[in-house]
Image (cartoon, grey):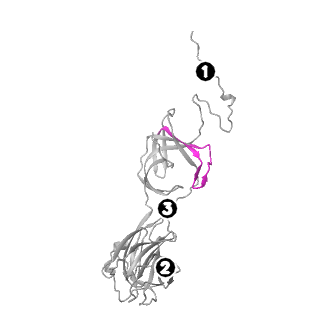
Amino acid sequence: MKKQILALLSATALLAVSTQAMATQVSGAVNVDNRFAVVVSQNGTNTVVYTAPSNYTWGREATRFKFNVDESNLERCHISLVNWGDGAVAEGFAGVFKGDKGAVYTGGSGWTAKESTINSGGFSNVPSASVINSIVPATSGGVTDLGSTQSHPTWGSVKPFYTPADFGMGSIPGNFNWIRPAGTNKTTKKHFVYSTPCSNLVKEAPKAIHMPGEHFQCYNLEKGDHIKTERVVVKDQFGKSDVVIGKPRMLCNPSAKVHNGKEYRIRNEKRHLVCYDYVRPPRIRPQNLRINNQFAPDEVVATRSQMFCVPSSKEHIDKIGRVTPSKSDPRPRRSDIRPSERPMPRR
């Protein structure tokens, strides 16, 4: 019998494990006056995930792009759009970002709009990494919070450039509009920064947890044919079944474990588990589940009942059926000492 890894539920089920990605894709659709870059700030690092080309013209159509955000660590994670231009008009931004948690769009809530103290030098200049690090996200000290204002007469409506799919909604929101930092000088060439927390767009990945309770290490069993089959009724969270229990197939010992510097001790050294196979296994519908423990969260599918495990006692015996002395008392007990068997002489 092959080695098996069991998830010990009320009735043990064989789990088909699916790999869970640790990155979530975010899509963007924007119009920006004038040029822009999109930055993801995470784990203390600013990463430029998209930069508008040098021939970018915002009035033709919405510019669409995609990028990934690590869903396992959303603390102090921000998505920012930095825009700059030629200083001819007040720079602005219209657009939407959408992830698996929802969408954040201009005209709605969720944005911080700020102005930096750094001159862009004009439309053709892409901000350097040092400039990006000093002004992004819009929660840093290199920008001034001016709040945001909506619309501008010179830009007009860009709603025809978008579809409801860009927002993940049935229609384009009625309050979708341009935004810009309030009170900005229309002739400035400074960088503007619009930021939203990643948690507005991305669902945080479940984190590993430390569940209380006993740990077990399981072993395959051989022989084990001294019991008759038993008919029992088993009920758990997946349903109720009338089953027939067969031979013992696995023994699980209470076990101590050290993991990532944390020690998990045995709580009840006398309680073991013996797991029996099914002569007539119960039928269940496949169950989509999310499991979590000290190793990692995961998404699995429970497909069929494999074994049924019951609390059990255990004794060590030698080949002729004698109980092996415990480690605490290595001396054999008198009741355990038997004379060796001698062959009868032939006559």
Instruction: Please state which amino acid type lies under the numbered disc 3.
Output: Pro
Q: Is residue 248 above or below residue 24?
A: above
Mark 1 or 2: in front is 2
Which residue lies under the disc numbered 2? 135
Split into 4 quadrants, where in the image is the C terminus?
Answer: top right
Q: Position of residue 216 (x, y in %)?
A: 55, 47
Asked if the residue at tag 2 contacts the one at tag 1, i.e. Cβ–Cβ closer than 8 Å, the answer is no
Instruction: Please state which amino acid type lies under the numbered disc 1.
Output: Glu
Which residue lies under the disc numbered 3? 206
Q: Residue 341 got which mark?
A: 1
Residue 130 visible to the viewer: yes
Instruction: Please state which amino acid type lies under the numbered disc 2.
Output: Ile
Label located before the other in sequence (1 or 2): 2
Split into 4 quadrants, where in the image is the N terminus?
Answer: top left
Q: Residue at x 48, y 52 (%)?
A: 237
Q: Magenta span covers which residues?
A: 245-272
